[in-house]
Amino acid sequence: MVIVSSNSDSDDSHKLREKKRFVDISTPSDELIVRNEESMRPSKFRDFIGQIQLKKLLSISVEASLTRKEPLDHILLYGPPGLGKTTMAMLLAEEIGVKCHISSAPALERPRDILGIILNLKDCELLFIDEIHRLTRVSEELLYPAMEDFRVDLTVGRGSSSRIRSISLPRFTLIGATTRPASISSPLRDRFGITHRFDFYNFKELQMIVERTADFFKLAITKEASYQIACRCRGTPRLANRLVRRVRDFATVKGQNKKIEESLVNEALNLLHIDKRGLDATDRKLLTNLVQFHGGGPVGLDTLAASLGEDSATLESVVEPFLLQIGFLERTPRGRVITVEARNHLSQ
């Protein structure tokens, strides 16, 4: 239950702030979509590369939803950043033919912030909340009846004149995205009908993404060059697209943007200090520090962070996941340990 004041703000500046709290993504029929970097996002399941199991699951749910003319069940997507959670939410809206209202948990600090969105939803529309684990407790409790019973209970007024008002909501679909699913409270997590993890992409999928992005930028690229980029983007499409842009910049300056060759990719990415396994300067600094000052480990996270001059939370959430994924680092009860494979890579 949420207490609201009976006196609402009505000035223009307040309305402008309310509009900025979320973004409407409309279907192509609105003819408002222009050709920019956002249009690189796929709009159909067949164009979305990777995440095969998730696509199968959601395509069935979408078809069933359209057949029964009912909204999709609430969906929770989790996994490392840059793997396509926001893209999947927008794709679902395109497939169903409805709007996707996009917001993030930090922008929904007060109850009225989230009320302003859900009260303006229409039947079967999607509400996408990024980093949903950062919702405040009051906002979470507001979502419980909204997700289950499609209603909100408001206490209007104060003191003896207060009264409870229950407002019915349209049957909408909430799509939550998070990089930290364990931080979501159990009551909220249990209200999602579909929960799925986004996995890192393999080299073949990433190569297809690189070639698709190069085609978007009207760049001719060889198979060898696209494979080199795919090998260095840490299993993440967002980074693959970023590297394609950097290679494009390098090719433009060098006057070699007619066709991207493998040698040009190597030269550009070496300049960015990204090696053939996708390690950047921070990754190599961590591994080198482990070897030179700690004998390869084991060493505690706080000790390692202090010796590198980095925040321990940054190392744990940003740097370590990729090193663990490729088998260059191990977490043991006694601390971090470098692997033989990582030692061999550093010696090359």
Image: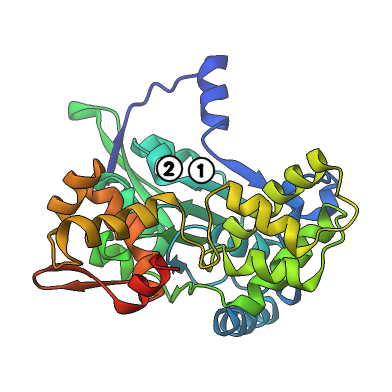
Query: x%, y% of residue 339?
Result: 29, 75
Pick whichever, 180 or 288, lies toward us. 288
- Tally of numbered discs: 2
- Give residue 206's position: percent from left, percent from top: 64, 71
Q: Residue at x 57, y 15 (%)?
A: 12
Is residue 256 found left or right of 225 in the rendered image? right
Q: Residue at x 38, y 60 (%)?
A: 179
Q: Which mark is residue 114?
A: 2
Who's the residue at 17% across and 44% down the image? 306
User: Where is residue 181 drawn, in percent x and y?
Assistant: 32, 65
Dot 2: element: helix
Q: Which residue is mark 1?
A: 117
Asked whether 102 or 270 is in front, the reply is 270
Q: Is residue 69 above or below residue 268?
A: below
Element type at marker 1? helix
| Residue type for callout 2 | Ile
Camera-side residue of 231 and 201: 231
- For label 1, count other residues whose C-alpha is less than 10 Å away and answer few (under 14), some (14-19) or many (20+): some
Which amino acid is tagged 1?
Ile
Along the horizontal axis of the image, is 317 left or right of 275?
Answer: left
